[in-house]
Amino acid sequence: MLEKHSALGLQQEPSKLMVSLARNASEVAEAQRLRYKVFAEEMGANLPSNDGYDRDGFDAFCEHLLVRNAAGEVVGTYRILNPFMANEAGGYYSAGEFDLSRLNHLFDRTVEVGRACVHPDYRHGATITLLWAGLAKYMQTNRYEFMIGCGSIGMADGGHMAASLYTSLQKDYLSPAEYRVFPRCPLPLDALKTDMEVTCPPLIKGYLRLGAYICGEPAWDPDFNTADMLVMLPLSRINKRYAAHFFK
């Protein structure tokens, strides 16, 4: 669940990784640097900054999870916006892409996650497992009940893959009507192919395996050139088989 999430592929696993929350501005900057490398340099996102750091107004209100390798370098990151800091920030990031009105009554128990990204050399199960384990510990410690975030699909093909993926996933994973959200800049599904064979991005696939919903049609984010689906995971729906490594 990602505001923006990089594609997570499979590569060789490193010998040692560790996860922690950023403790100061310098450590947050390390996360922002990795985000820039992945989102701007690798994926071509049109970011507001061009100084080598991906930053926005939400960073100051978020907790930042960091995965470091044996050399101490940040190779994975996730940011977390809890309900108290969301109030300070003026709302959740995803409210800029979706009308979240139907979720308002859940906001005092809801954490938003996003800006997940992983260095190309560390895109394997161990890194994302550590990020999710850190997130799980955070939610359990603070007794939050819901997690939301934007799951992103690249639109290099003009959006046909994203439209086809949403059409395929909605059959089994669309949320109940009371959790439905509405895109402010909708992906034009009627003008796109919706029957292509597509592969679900690993991060979105992981959320769905855990028990997450897709809360409605995708929005188009022109800056990142992605189609974003709001993903929601009530902890009460956690699939125990897949969650065993994260929630302990």
Image: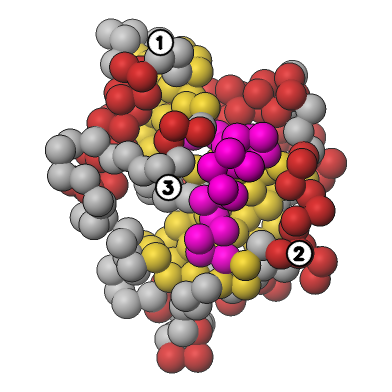
Counting from the top left corner in percent of width and height, residue 112 is at: 60, 43
* Three-letter code for the amino acid on which mark 1 is drawn: Lys
Residue at image coords 15%, 44%: 50
Q: CA distance from mark 2 to mark 3?
A: 24 Å
Task: Measure the C-alpha gap from mark 1 to mark 3.
Answer: 23 Å
Query: Which residue is most to the left?
Result: 51
Q: Residue at x 48, y 25 (%)?
A: 65
The amino acid beneath tag 2 is: Arg
| Residue 239 seen by the camera | no
Q: Secondary structure at mark 1?
A: loop
Residue positioned most to the bottom: 191
Q: Position of residue 200 (x, y in %)?
A: 50, 58
Q: Residues within 10 Å of mark 2 (few under 14, many from 20)?
A: few
Question: Which secondary structure lies at badge 2?
Answer: helix
Q: Residues within 10 Å of mark 1 (few under 14, many from 20)?
A: few
Compare marks 1 and 2 and give the one earlier in the sequence: 1
Q: Identify the residue under disc 1.
A: 16
Looking at the image, is 111 positioned above or below residue 149?
above
Residue extent of the magenta highlight = 79-98
Report the residue at 71% width, 32% height from top. 243
Q: Nearer the viewer, residue 90 or 52?
A: 90
Closer to the N terminus: mark 2 or mark 3? 3
| Residue ID for mark 3 | 5
Q: Nearer the viewer, mark 1 or mark 2?
A: 2
- Mark 1–mark 2 Cα distance, whole angstroms, equals 43 Å
Check if residue 115 falls in the magenta segment. no
Res 102 label? 2
Residue that appears at 58% across and 23% down: 134
